[in-house]
Amino acid sequence: MWVYTDKVKELFDNPKNVGEVEDADGVGEVGSLSCGDALKLTFKLDDEGRIVDAKFQTFGCASAIASSSALTEMIIGKTLDEAGKITNQDIVDFLGGLPDKKMHCSVMGQEALRAAIANYRGEKLPKEDSEIVCECFGVSEKEIVDAIQHNSLTTLEQVTDYTKAGGGCGTCHERIEAILEEVMGQEGAEPKVEEPAKPRLSNIQRMKLIEETLEKEIQPNLAKDGGSIELVDIVGDRVLVSLKGACATCAASDITLKHYVESKLRELVTDTLVVEEVAQ
Amino acid sequence: MKTIYVDNNATTRVAPEVFEEMTPYFTDLYGNPSSMHFFGGQVQRKVEEARERVAGLLGARPQEIIFTSCGTESDNAAIMSALQCNPEKRHVLTTRVEHPAVKNLVANLKREGYRVTELPVDRHGLLSMEEVSRAMTDDTAIVSVMWANNETGVLFPVEEIATLAKSRGVIFHTDAVQAVGKIPVNMAESHIDMLSLSGHKLHAPKGIGVLYVRRGTRFAPFVIGGHQEEGRRGGTENVPYIIGLGKACELAATDLEEKNLRVKSLRDKLENGLLEVVGNSIINGDAEQRLPNTSSISFEYVEGESILLKLSDKGICASSGSACTSGSLEPSHVLRAMGVPFTAAHGSIRFSLSFYNTEEEIDYILEVVPPIIEQLREISPFWKGPTARSCAAS
């Protein structure tokens, strides 16, 4: 059984703004009977260009009905520019959350809104020019790319949860993986959120931190295999160590040094450090 | 709120008599049936009594009964045994509407290089014997066809297929999880080689199943271990559950015909009542070749999960073949194989009754369902009123 929030349950039991606005200014229809969910959104503007009335009709599960109801509540009173900024995540937040597998219900809300606004403005939706990737559910490349970017998706499964793409016969899985790689690659080139930079350390601080990391982080782990490590010296970025106990005679000690000790020090101290073994 | 449980193809209530029979084997009589002492010996005798009771319901010999953990294990054991005993044969013949226990197993076999034929069904959910016959070849290691479909209740002519398979020298297995306890089964007058059943579908608890293996059928164990079950299924016996299943089979064999008639009349009352009051509703599955307890009914233009949640709020427990309820995005593979249109497949509800259901419960369901469908149709963008053309009629 799905676990729905009280808000989803409330809007499913008593949906608001059901029906069709008469003489609607904008009409957005997304989904279809074959997809298992569909939403028709209609709205009316006042003289100042604000949405005075919005109604929905939805074929779908509880979360689809609740998402649609939430959408109408969120857009009434807004200008089209303001409404156009509403994302599927805003709908999810309004509902207090949705199960992962139901995220596509919120995406359907966002898309119906975009379609209705485009319909009012007499514009074409960008997705109409975009190639269909998932034939089963009629999902375009543009929709997939948008969902990945707006929700920071990283896996095929997430793309299916949010857009339904790939949830049918599965022949488009490779294509979706390729889109994911492409979008994530771009994001890697210009990261949106920068990692917090490590604070600059003085030489003394750095030495202390290296010593501390070796002692508290690395030593206990090597000790589990009967090994031990000793700090000999620090010369610039070079950390000179000597391996003792089981490590001293272990054929894999080079790997331990590079893959474990060095990477741990780089992670916790400075990423320019190089670890070298010296004989004592 | 009273619970109206009409989801008996999912699981059933443990009969009070079954529970009562089981309890001493959790408390005082905890011996291991394999032990040499009197304390284990008395448990062993009770396990053998349960085996006789199961055999009694199936019209089988006690030594043809192997206790397993569930229906899925029985299905897996049957198919894997046939393949192992006939290593030169590389073909598996089954249908498109099997339970995942068979469906996903043969999908794996396909990846391992076996040739798998999944026979189609017509719009009533029925198989063509001609196609069955055509698909069976010298290379076929096993034919596995379910007796009764869990979603629609449609019955397959398994006896006929078993006879055909025997004449071609092919092993025949049936997943009879939904059939045993609901319709008469008699292995003494049958050519079925192997048959799976599951305890919790016939008022025994979850976690116990049976694989029937006809005497003389070559068998390779699936769970390898000790000498239990004559070396055909390793692992210490699940004693209390085996005893519970024995009692459940004894109960099922008592007045089967009479109970069936009662369940069928309640099912028919429910079905006819809904079809009469709710427009654009369709029964999925053949009207005649069907279990007496199951009704899969599609309400067009509304979605199954929404219906189920509203029913659940009224205390009614049913299930659906809609995409949303399963967590997958596509509606049930059974309804799709039958070519049920999407308008109807997404809005399918399965009511499955047991002899514990009462006429009052059916009256209550008949009162509750129509306004729910009406309410959801008012929200649906596809519903244009009761005059709308039914897709299923075209």
Image (spheres, coloured by chain):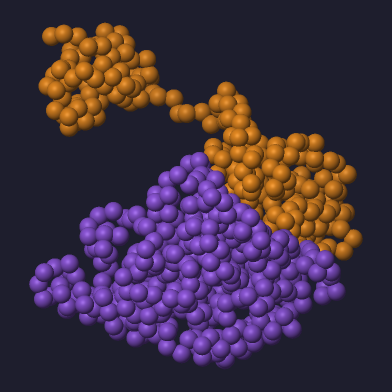
Check the rendered structure and report the hue given to chain A: orange
Q: Nearer the viewer, residue B275 or A218?
A: B275
Q: Is residue B189 above or below residue A191?
A: below
Q: Position of residue B228 (x, y in %)?
A: 24, 63
Q: Quadrant of the C terminus of chain A?
A: top left
The answer to which image quadrant residue B159 occupies is bottom right
Q: Position of residue B223 (x, y in %)?
A: 32, 55
Regarding residue B209, the answer to whether it shows in the image is no
**In the image, is B181 to the left or to the right of B149?**
left
Q: Is residue A79 above or below residue A143?
A: below
Q: Residue furthest left?
A: B37
Point 26% across, 71% down: residue: B239
Point 26% across, 16% down: residue: A254
Q: Is residue B276 above or below residue A158?
A: below
**In the image, is A90 to the left or to the right of A139?**
left
Q: Position of residue B71 (x, y in %)?
A: 42, 65
Check the rendered structure and report the hue given to chain B: purple
Q: Nearer the viewer, residue B165 or B64?
A: B165
**In the image, is B239 to the left or to the right of A125?**
left
Regarding residue B37, the answer to whether it shows in the image is yes
Q: Nearer the viewer, residue B168 or A241?
A: B168
